Image (spheres, grey):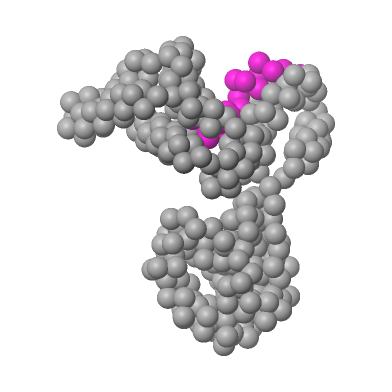
């Protein structure tokens, strides 16, 4: 076993799988395995545990989850951690590393910053730095084919295509959704596109993008249908906040376009694919400032009335969407 593992990448499921493999291979009992989610807890608390003597054992494992400070990401969470956490103590921990501790650092970001001192210190400890990339479409397709075959079901090509479209490349979602689908089916039942549409909800981000577009395109029936889909896993206020965020995203996109940004620069700025950048830029160009301001005013008014108790949140959000 190595002393330090740094796992990074967007594939949270694969990262969790690797974490569990390391813990199982170590043979360390559960009393000496600790997990600290740094998006919720402080770094010093995790370090204090990592520096404490194992309980009736030679070794202990400490998992540092959601380590934004290893990444090249400049988002809010990374900035918060670098501002609030005592990084000098963390460097000291790596420089004076305890012999009885195995550390697993989990950084769910696409890249890590190899220029950072803390990354170099992990390398100095001969730590394992391992990427956990998003599954490719081919990998997901093979997994789906094998899962359906092993379940004793068959499927139509339309059904499989719909599964792939709905699950996209979300490794945190597709296995759970497939298991839910199998529980719904009768033994040996053929999987059709209609069953997939009924049982598997699209990636929430895609759904929210479709919802905001349906609202702006004044497609009431489509907007309310998507809203009901989202309600299966979200409450109405969460959906309202998400609609506000999508509209803010459109406004921000319009400002970027006004500055003469290219599609490639747009994709890089928002950390998205060029394909998604194309559609977001197109959407922003087709949406006027007047329309955005109208909807911002409506959402602010609704939010205020919900907080005052004048409007039921579920009815209020539904009526708002019906104004499209």
Residue appearing at x 34%, y 15% in the figure: 323
In the rendering, at what x and y percent does residue 303 appear?
26, 32
Query: To which quarter of the image does residue 299 belong?
Result: top left
Residue 160 versus residue 21 in the image, above or below: above
In the rendering, at what x and y percent does residue 202 appear?
58, 29
Residue appearing at x 70%, y 59% in the figure: 131
Q: Nearer the viewer, residue 180 or 261?
A: 261
Residue 102 versus residue 283 in the image, above or below: below
Q: Is residue 61 visible?
A: no
Residue 29 versus residue 167 in the image, above or below: below
Q: Which residues are magenta?
A: 189-208
Residue appearing at x 66%, y 22% in the figure: 196
Q: Residue furthest bottom?
A: 96
Q: Is residue 154 visible?
A: yes
Q: Which is the main secondary structure of the residues drawn in magenta?
A: helix
Residue 19 versus residue 118 in the image, above or below: above
Query: To which quarter of the image does residue 113 belong?
Result: bottom right
Q: For the N terminus, give its image quadrant.
A: bottom right
Residue appearing at x 46%, y 80% in the figure: 88
């Amino acid at each position: 076993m190595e002393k330090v593992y740094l796992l990074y990448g967007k594939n949270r499921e694969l990262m969790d799988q690797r974490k569990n493999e390391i813990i199982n291979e170590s043979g360390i009992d559960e009393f000496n395995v600790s997990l600290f989610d740094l998006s919720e807890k402080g770094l010093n608390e995790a370090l204090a545990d990592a520096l404490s003597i194992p309980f009736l054992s030679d070794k202990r494992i400490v998992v540092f989850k959601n380590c934004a400070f290893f990444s090249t990401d400049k988002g809010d969470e990374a900035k918060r951690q670098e501002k609030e956490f005592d990084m000098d103590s963390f460097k000291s921990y790596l420089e004076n590393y305890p012999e009885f501790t195995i550390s697993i650092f989990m950084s769910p970001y696409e890249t890590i910053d190899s220029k950072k001192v803390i990354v170099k210190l992990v390398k100095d400890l001969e730590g394992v730095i391992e990427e956990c990339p998003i599954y490719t479409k081919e990998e997901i397709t093979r997994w789906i084919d094998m899962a359906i075959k092993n379940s004793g079901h068959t499927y139509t090509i339309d059904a499989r295509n719909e599964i792939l479209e709905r699950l996209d490349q979300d490794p945190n979602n597709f296995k759970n959704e497939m298991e839910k689908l199998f529980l719904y089916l009768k033994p040996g039942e053929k999987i059709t596109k209609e069953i997939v549409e009924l049982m598997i909800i699209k990636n929430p981000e895609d759904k929210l993008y479709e919802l905001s577009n349906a609202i702006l395109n004044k497609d009431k029936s489509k907007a309310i249908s998507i809203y009901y889909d989202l309600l299966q896993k979200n409450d109405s206020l969460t959906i309202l906040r998400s609609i506000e965020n999508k509209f803010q995203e459109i406004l921000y996109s319009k400002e970027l376009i006004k500055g003469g940004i290219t599609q490639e620069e747009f994709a890089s700025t928002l950390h998205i694919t060029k394909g998604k950048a194309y559609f977001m830029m197109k959407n922003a160009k087709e949406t006027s400032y007047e329309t955005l301001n109208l909807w911002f005013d409506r959402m602010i008014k609704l939010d205020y009335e919900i907080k005052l108790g004048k409007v039921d949140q579920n009815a209020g959000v539904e009526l708002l969407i019906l104004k499209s």
